[in-house]
Image (spheres, helix red, strand yellow):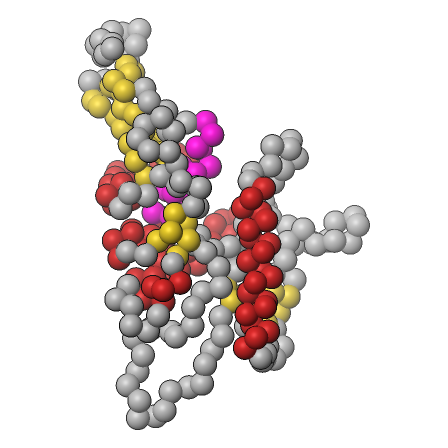
């Protein structure tokens, strides 16, 4: 039923009040990304931020563009193009519409809870290889921006608590390891991520939002001087997108907090 949008008592009238999960197919637990269109949609920090907001709000219902803009402290008009690109790539969907002052307003929900980049898109002959690395770089920019904003407003703390434990962890090292050790390390890290993913979000009253960004990669020998330059790095990522922040890779001293 469509209510009268001109009624002064009801300036916002439902046209399709479907919730995020009941409109269209069920939300995927994890989406495997392997096509260029989706990778290009992910290659922007603001679009990743929009996805994060919608995933965080999935339990309470879909959001309109103005609500997403308020959550990101961005102008609403700046988001329309990005929202449409995410929708076109199937990363978000219209979960319902309503009439607001005579204008149909779309409300959006995520199409998946998490994303994982398919390993084969990083192979040397893959046509989507550069797009995949661009998506990873966008995720790095996103984490950097969020961390700076939280740190500058005093919302993160790397000091030790009363027990002497660190509330945050930062490390950046380079080690030289055997290939099999690199594989084992990747497996150990992946096991932690899988455990967290299986647990899901905590409902505890004292729960905090934790950002985990991991980048692990092995660097092969430098190409011969007369060899043609590679179009992109040759190593594959250690974790899924959106990846989670401390990074470790191959040989000498580094930094840790």
Quarter of image, res 128: bottom left
Left/right of residue 53 with respect to residue 178 in the rendered view: left
Q: Is 167 situated above or below 255?
A: above
Q: Is 159 situated above or below 180?
A: above
Q: Does any portion of residue 130 appear in the rendered image?
A: no
Residue 204, horizontal then vertical, whole percent: 64, 33
Q: Which residues are magenta?
A: 47-60
Q: Is 82 situated above or below 191?
A: above
Q: Residue at x 47, y 78 (%)?
A: 219
Residue 85, horizontal then vertical, whole percent: 25, 45
Q: Does any portion of residue 173 appear in the rendered image?
A: yes
Q: Between 248 and 182, which is closer to the camera in this rendering?
A: 182
Q: Is 129 situated above or below 31?
A: below
Q: Between 184 and 110, which is closer to the camera in this rendering?
A: 184
Quarter of image, res 120: bottom left
Q: Residue furthest right?
A: 163
Residue 214, horizontal then vertical, whole percent: 52, 60
Q: Quadrant of the C terminus?
A: bottom right
Q: Residue at x 64, y 50 (%)?
A: 157
SS assignment for the magenta stretch, majority: helix
Q: Between 70 and 253, which is closer to the camera in this rendering?
A: 253
Q: Residue at x 40, y 40 (%)?
A: 28
């Amino acid at each position: 039923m469509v209510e009268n949008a001109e009624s002064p008592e009801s300036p916002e009238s439902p046209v399709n009040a479907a919730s995020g999960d009941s409109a269209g197919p069920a939300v995927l637990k994890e989406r495997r990304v392997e096509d260029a269109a989706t990778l290009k949609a992910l290659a922007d920090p603001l679009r990743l931020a929009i996805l994060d907001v919608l995933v965080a709000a999935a339990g309470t219902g879909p959001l309109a563009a103005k609500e997403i803009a308020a959550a990101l402290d961005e102008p609403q008009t700046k988001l329309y193009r990005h929202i449409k690109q995410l929708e076109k790539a199937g990363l978000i969907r219209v979960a319902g519409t309503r009439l607001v002052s005579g204008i149909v307003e779309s409300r959006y929900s995520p199409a998946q809870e998490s994303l994982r980049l398919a390993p084969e898109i990083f192979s040397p002959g893959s046509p989507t290889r550069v797009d995949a690395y661009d998506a990873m770089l966008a995720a790095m920019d996103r984490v950097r921006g969020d961390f700076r904003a939280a740190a500058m407003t005093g919302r993160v703390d790397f000091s030790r608590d009363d027990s002497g434990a660190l509330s945050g962890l930062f490390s950046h090292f380079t080690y030289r390891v055997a290939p099999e050790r690199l594989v084992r390390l990747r497996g150990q890290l992946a096991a932690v991520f899988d455990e967290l993913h299986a647990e899901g979000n905590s409902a505890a009253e004292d729960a905090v939002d934790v950002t985990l960004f991991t980048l692990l990669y092995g660097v092969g020998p430098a190409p011969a001087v007369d060899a043609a330059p590679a179009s992109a790095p040759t190593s594959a990522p250690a974790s899924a997108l959106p990846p989670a922040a401390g990074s470790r890779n191959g040989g000498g001293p580094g930094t840790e907090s």
